[in-house]
Structures are given as C-alpha cells and as structure tokens.
C-alpha cells in the first residue's frame, strides 16, 4: 500500500516537473507566450522557429532545468539534515554552509572591487538588473566562476569549521550548536565586510535572496552531476538514517557503523547544499518544506523520503521560478521570496490541517 | 576445568566494568568495577534504586557504551567481535529514545533484521517471517501499516519490543521493557520471555518493578554503581538483599504462589 503510493508520488513528481518545464520555457519578459507551437512546427515559419529555438535553448531551458536541479539538491539536503539531526526543524543550511557561502561571495566582491560591476554587462528586463550585474549571476563568465567558486569554497569551509568546533560528528547536539555558532559569527563577519565595501551591497542582496536567472548549461550540468552523486550516496546510506531514528545506541546495537556513516551523510549534506548555494544563492525554505510536504502525503523509510523530497524540492523551485518570471512580467521577482511565501504558506496550511490529528503533518 | 569449559554456561561475563556519564567537570562515575556472570538460557533481572547504574550496566553489556574492563559475549571478547556479528548474537532494547514517528510499525520491526541483511539487499522471506512472528508475539501485527507516531506509549513500547525480538538473537537485553504497558500486556510480556528462555535464549532485563523482577530466574541487586547481590529469585538471601538496598522500606510477600514486593506504608489501626 505504501510502496504503491510512493511509486505514484514519484511518477507524479516527474510528470509535474516535465509539465513545469514546458510551461517554464514559455514564460518570459512578455508573460506567457506559446513557444511550443513554433518549436514543434518548424515548417510553418522558419524565422520564428529559429528565434524560439534560440530563446528556449540558450536561456530558458537551462534556467528552468537549473531551477529543478537546485531545488532537487536542496530538497535532498533537507531530508538528509532532518534525518541526521533527528529534528523536523533542521534545514540544509544548518551546518553553516549558507553563511559561509555569503562570506565567500562578500569577500570575493570586496576583492574584485567596484570594478566588477563593469564586467557584468547589461541584461534587460530584470528587476534586479543592477544587482545581478556584479553578482554570482553576472553574465561575465570569469566573474561568475570566481564568485561561484568563492561561494562553494565558503560553504565547504564553513562546514569544516563547524565539524572542527563540534570535534567531529559523534555528538549531534554539539554539531547543531556549532553550526548555529558558525552561522551567526560568519553572518556577522559578512556584514562587517559589507560595511567596508558598500558598493557590493546590492550584489550581496541578490545573492541572499537567491536567483536562478543566470543558470546556464554549465551550471545545470554541474548541479545535475552532483545531484546524481548525492542521490546515489543517500540511497546507499538510507538504512543508516532509518536505524538512527531509533536512537544512536540502538543503531549501534544493530551493528551499524554509525560514526563513518554519519560523516558520509554530513559530506552529502555539505556537497548538495554547497553546490546549490553556489549556483543560485540562498534560496529559502525549499529544503525545510520539501521533506514535510512528502511526510504529509506518505509515511515511509528514508530511502523513499529522500528521493521524493528531492523531486518535490525540484518541482517547488521550478514552480516558484516560473511564477517569479511570469507574475509581474516584464519585471522579475526574486525567486527566494516566492519560495518563502509559497513554501511557508503551504507548510502553515499543513500544520493547521494536521492540528486536528495530533499535529501529525508538521 | 579449562577456561573455555568454564565459559560454556556463561552468556555474558563482565570483568571490572567501570563507566562514566557526562563530560568535563560534570563527568560522574556511574559504575565502579562491576564483575558479573550472566548464565546462558536463563532470565536475569537487574534491580536497584533509581540511579544505581542499572541501565548503564546494561548498555556496557550490550557494547553500546564506552567503558573500562572487559565483556565476554558467548565466550568471546566483545571488542574483537565484528559489529554485525555481535548484533546478530545480542539484541538490546533501550528506554524510549526513538524519533522514528514517520516509519510504519512494519518498517520499525524490520530494522531488527539489519544485522542479518546484506547492504541494500531487500528483505528475505526469513526476515518477513521473523518480523511477523515478533509483531504477533507482542500483538502489534494489526497495526503494521500505521506510523509509529500515531500509537500510544504502551503500543509503541510493544512495537519496539517486537523490533528487538525480530533480531532473533541468542542474548536479549531489555531496559525497562514494561514501561507504559498495562497489566494484561505485562502478563503477555512474561509469556514471551518464558517462551524465549524455554528455547534457550538468554534474557537480561532492567526492571524497576520488583514484583516483576522476582519472576526472573536470577536477580542482580545493584546500588551506587556496584553489584551487592546476585542469586536465584526465590532465595531468602536475595529477598534480604533487596529489602536492604531499599532501606527496609519494602517487604516481600508470597501471594498466590508469586513473590510480591510492596512498599511499607503506615500500619492501619
């Protein structure tokens, strides 16, 4: 009965992603425009087809697919974090990766100086135009690689610092507290850096709100590759998470190699979160909401939970991205704001609905 | 008699076990060099006042808590046993610390089969049979599709007990297995334990209810991190040791063929 439901949810998740992909490539600066017809009927108007092909292939398809990949990474990371910390409030940024990435970007922006803005070049039709030019999402390849790299290095360094402070992964509560401390301290440092480089404030804001605007094929391939590795690793480690949910001692008594497996799970969490954050900035709430949405639909083992949560995260971010582009076209909303509103709203609704039967949903 | 032969009837041999809980200045020694032989194929109950170190001792015997001293499991030093092999031979039921609310009852009980399963291998027919038998023994079979989080405290306890039974280990250690159980299900638990012992399984339980503990074959009496007495449950010396560690504030009576420990209240006029 449960496996049946899991299978249908997985199929539903993939179908929803495909539908959103088709819708997503049709949403642009003029709102919704049907590009599928010229794409699929090249003989009717070759000129229009060529233009549609270019828009879809060069810009919208990698961006929409990238939104899915980033959401899928965050959804997976959220399920791993909640299982690892045995806490339904855990989110992927708990180990300090978000604030680490922010600091990395802030330092890189400071190092590049105000001149980085000149490298950005103009993209049109975006509400965050000025900000985007110097941000991770800048269209200049070198600035982007530099800032993306800085974000990733920052995220990984922050997680390593958390691990160092908590003296390993043996003690979950200590790990959680160290993550909180690292998060607070690095955020403060980021603000300090920004205080001395006011030029980069706007670019930082764009990073903090998250955006999928400039995800190209390279970014998408990177995220998709990391997603494959992480999903595979999570699948291999799923039973450990099931065992850990009975408590550390019980997991040990069942002969599970708890310490090395927990280290591997932290690595999956850090890699998935670091990759997503580096490509799309800090996208709020997807990682927290996705596992809860899955749990509200089906109670199952971590192997299924992580996979479904990843699919739901992808769909959630894709939907938010499409809305962000279409709602106020030609202006574009920061996608992080939409994920927070959508995810938060749905979670609240679940909580109140679940309140009737002992808060089972959330 | 050689050492090997001497070990034959001993399921667990603990030799000067010391253990501490907490860290830094809050670190406190809970066990002070406990040595103990648990006889194979018998039911041993560990009793003592709150804070005597009963659960800590059980954790050391189960190999899930760092300690000094040595523990031999079925004649072999526990430290040299591979974890999975130890897990097949010894099952441990801890006090409720689970957060597996989203797993179904079936999935929770199936976790007991982990030591028998190859990595990523699907559950075998033997696993299914073991889980069904365990869930039926604790009368949890009817809820197998329900999430653990939807069950009451006593119902959860029966599922966790089934999880430990599903291991089908030769040695079963249980920490307060009767927590939240109503009297009929306490009686069911007694039947389960007696059936296990009849099959040759070694059972060790920590029980705060002395009357239940006196159903066991052997009683270990602990106080302040030390074992003060170890003997058959129906011997007067065992009863005397029990009354002693509880400051003579209990009395042990024989009622309808059972030993019953009652707190001493004010005498009615």
Image (cartoon, coloured by chain):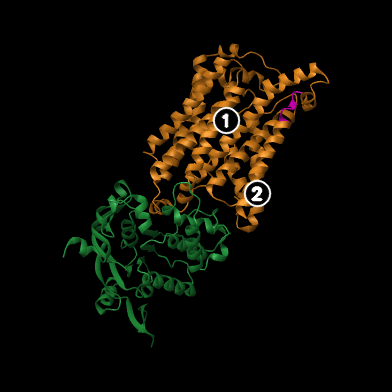
Q: Is residue B236 magenta?
A: no
Residue A353 place in picture, x, y as percent: 67, 52
Q: In the figure, what tint was chain A given? A: orange
Chain identifier of the residue bearing label 2 in the image: A
Of residue A18 and residue A282, the one placed in the foreground of this image is: A18
| Residue at point 40%, 36% (across, down) | A163
Label 2 sits on a secondary structure element that is helix
- B53 horizontally vs A336: left or right: left
Q: Is residue B124 above or below residue B192?
A: above
Foreground: disc 2 or disc 1: 1
Q: Is residue A238 above or below residue B101?
A: above
The outermost residue toward the left is: B1
The quadrant where residue A129 appears:
top right
Per the rendering, the mark at residue A350 is 2
| Residue at point 53%, 47% (across, down) | A302
User: Contact, CB < 8 Å: mark 2 with mark 1?
Assistant: no
Q: Is residue A72 visible?
A: yes
- A334 horizontally vs B187: left or right: right
Distance Cα–Cα, label 2 vs label 1? 30 Å
Of residue A240 and residue A274, the one placed in the foreground of this image is: A240
Residue B67 place in picture, x, y as percent: 28, 52
Residue B217 place in picture, x, y as percent: 32, 73
Residue highlighted by disc 1 = A224
- A64 horizontally vs B261: left or right: right
Q: In the figure, what tint was chain B given? A: green
Residue A9 place in picture, x, y as percent: 65, 46
Chain identifier of the residue bearing label 1 in the image: A
Q: Residues within 10 Å of mark 1 (few under 14, many from 20)?
A: many
Q: Which residues are magenta?
A: A23-29
The quadrant where residue A21 appears:
top right
């Amino acid at each position: 009965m449960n496996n049946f439901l899991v299978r249908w949810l997985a199929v539903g998740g993939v179908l929803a992603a495909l539908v959103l992909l088709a819708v997503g490539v049709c949403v642009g600066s003029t709102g919704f425009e049907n590009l599928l017809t010229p794409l699929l009927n090249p003989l009717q108007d070759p000129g229009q087809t060529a233009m549609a092909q270019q828009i879809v292939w060069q810009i919208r398809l990698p961006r929409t697919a990238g939104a899915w990949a980033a959401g899928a990474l965050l959804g997976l990371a959220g399920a791993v974090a909640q299982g690892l910390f045995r806490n339904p409030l855990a989110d992927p940024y708990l180990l300090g990766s978000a604030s680490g990435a922010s600091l990395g970007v802030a330092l890189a922006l400071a190092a590049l100086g105000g001149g980085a803005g000149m490298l950005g070049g103009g993209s049109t039709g975006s509400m965050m135009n000025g900000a985007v030019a110097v941000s991770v999402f800048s269209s200049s390849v070198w600035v982007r690689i530099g800032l993306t790299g800085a974000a990733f290095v920052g995220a990984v360094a922050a997680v390593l610092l958390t691990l160092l402070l908590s003296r390993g992964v043996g003690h979950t509560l200590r790990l959680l507290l160290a993550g909180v401390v690292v998060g607070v301290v690095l955020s403060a440092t980021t603000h300090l850096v920004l205080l001395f480089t006011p030029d980069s404030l706007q670019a930082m804001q764009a990073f903090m709100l998250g955006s999928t605007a400039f995800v190209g094929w390279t970014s998408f391939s990177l995220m998709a590759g990391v997603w494959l590795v992480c999903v595979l690793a999570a699948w291999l480690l799923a039973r450990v998470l099931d065992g850990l949910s009975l408590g550390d001692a019980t997991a040990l008594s069942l002969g599970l190699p708890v310490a090395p497996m927990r280290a591997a799970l932290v690595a999956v969490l850090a890699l998935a979160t670091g990759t997503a954050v580096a490509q799309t900035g800090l996208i709020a709430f997807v990682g927290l909401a996705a596992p809860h949405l899955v749990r509200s639909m089906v109670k199952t083992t971590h192997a299924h939970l992580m996979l479904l949560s990843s699919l739901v995260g992808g769909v959630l971010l894709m939907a938010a991205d499409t809305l962000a582009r279409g709602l106020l076209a030609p202006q574009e909303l920061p996608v992080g704001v939409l994920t927070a509103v959508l995810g938060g709203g749905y979670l609240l609704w679940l909580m109140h609905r679940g309140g009737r039967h002992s808060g089972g949903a959330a | 008699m050689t050492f090997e032969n001497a070990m034959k009837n001993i399921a667990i041999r603990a030799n000067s076990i010391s253990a501490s809980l907490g860290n830094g200045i809050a670190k406190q020694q809970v066990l002070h060099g406990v040595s103990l032989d648990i006889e194979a194929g018998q039911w041993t109950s560990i009793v003592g006042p709150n804070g005597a170190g009963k659960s800590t001792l059980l954790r050391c015997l189960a190999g899930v808590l760092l300690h000094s001293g040595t523990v031999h499991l079925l004649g072999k030093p526990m430290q040299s046993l591979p974890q999975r092999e130890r897990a097949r031979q010894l099952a441990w039921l801890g006090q409720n610390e689970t957060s597996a609310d989203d797993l179904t009852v079936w999935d929770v009980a199936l976790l007991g089969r982990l030591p028998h399963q190859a990595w990523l291998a699907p559950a075998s027919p033997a696993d299914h049979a073991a889980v069904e038998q365990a869930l039926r023994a604790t009368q949890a079979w009817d809820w197998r599709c329900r999430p653990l989080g939807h069950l009451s405290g006593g119902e959860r306890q029966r599922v966790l007990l089934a999880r430990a039974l599903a291991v089908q280990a030769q040695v079963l250690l249980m920490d307060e297995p009767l927590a939240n159980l109503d009297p009929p299900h306490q009686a069911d638990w007694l039947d389960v334990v007696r059936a296990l012992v009849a099959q040759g399984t070694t059972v060790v339980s920590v029980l705060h209810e002395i009357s239940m503990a006196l159903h066991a074959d052997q009683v270990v009496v602990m106080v302040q991190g030390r074992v003060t007495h170890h003997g058959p449950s129906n011997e007067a010396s065992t009863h005397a040791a029990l009354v002693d560690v509880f400051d003579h504030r209990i009395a042990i009576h024989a009622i309808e063929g059972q030993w019953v420990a009652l707190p001493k209240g004010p005498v009615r006029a």
